[in-house]
Image (cartoon, grey):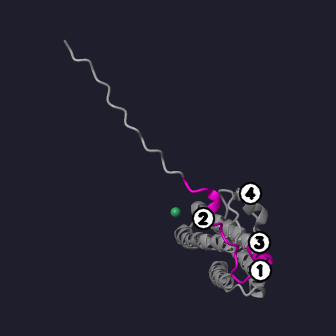
Amino acid sequence: MAKPKTKPAKTKTKAAPVAAPLASAPSAPNIDIGISGGERKKIADGLSRFLADSYTLYLKTHNFHWNITGAMFNSLHTMFETQYTEQWTALDEIAERIRALGFNAPGSYREFVSLTSIPEEPGLSDSADWREMVRQLVVGNEAVCRTARKVLDIADDADDAPTEDLLTQRLQTHEKYAWMLRSLLQ
Ligand SMILES: [Fe+2]
């Protein structure tokens, strides 16, 4: 005759420790970096417009890298790649500066379209000449420069050296790109 199975003895489980009440957790202190809230907002708004311009130009440069055709294919395909790769890295620095100033960075196509000063030119035909692509990139790089200068003025008024430094570096790059691209058409 088989032995009746014995049920394993129930062990009492310890109650999980109760988490400390949320109210006792320290809250984030207000931002106090020596720039007033109003000035931080003005700079962040300007940087948001600059980010939108930079993103739009980045996308246009990548678009032309994909769609370039013709005798200039090899050199322009490579040149556009160098430029959009550099621009892509810079987008992150611009957005993170906005965050450091205490505001959210725009991050959707809808926001970028409404904030940018660079018109999108969709539907370049198959026969679009490489010169038209280069012309659009000259104009786009110069538009980024104009926006950078306006925001640089706002940052300068607030003694916001990190934003001035960031925008100065972007100006150097985009003025150089505008020169290199324009040289192709001369
Ligand atoms: Fe590629």
Amino acid at circle 1: Ser
| Label 3: few (<14), some (14–19) or many (≥20) C-alpha neighbours in 10 Å | some
The residue at which mark 1 appears reads as 36
Q: Name the mark nearer the viewer: 4 or 3.
A: 3
Q: Is residue 79 left or right of residue 37?
A: left
Amino acid type at circle 2 is: His
Write the residue at 55% across / 54% down.
Answer: 19
- The label nearer to you, 1 versus 2, is 1
Mark earlier in primary sequence (4, 3): 3
Q: Earlier in the sequence, mark 4 or mark 1?
A: 1
Asked if labels 1 and 4 touch by Cβ distance under 8 angstroms, the answer is no
Q: Residue at x 71, y 68 (%)?
A: 103
| Residue annotated with mark 4 | 110
Q: Assess disc 4: are there few (<14), some (14-19) or many (≥20) residues with their C-alpha within 10 Å of its C-alpha.
A: few
**Quarter of image, res 82:** bottom right
Quadrant of the rendered image containing residue 125: bottom right
Query: What percent of the width, then of the height, locates residue 61?
Result: 63, 67
| Label ID, residue 45 | 3
* Mark closer to the observer (4, 2): 4
Question: Which of these two is toward me, 37 or 47?
Answer: 37
Q: Which residues are magenta?
A: 19-44
The image quadrant where one finds the N terminus is top left
Name the residue that disc number 2 marks.
62
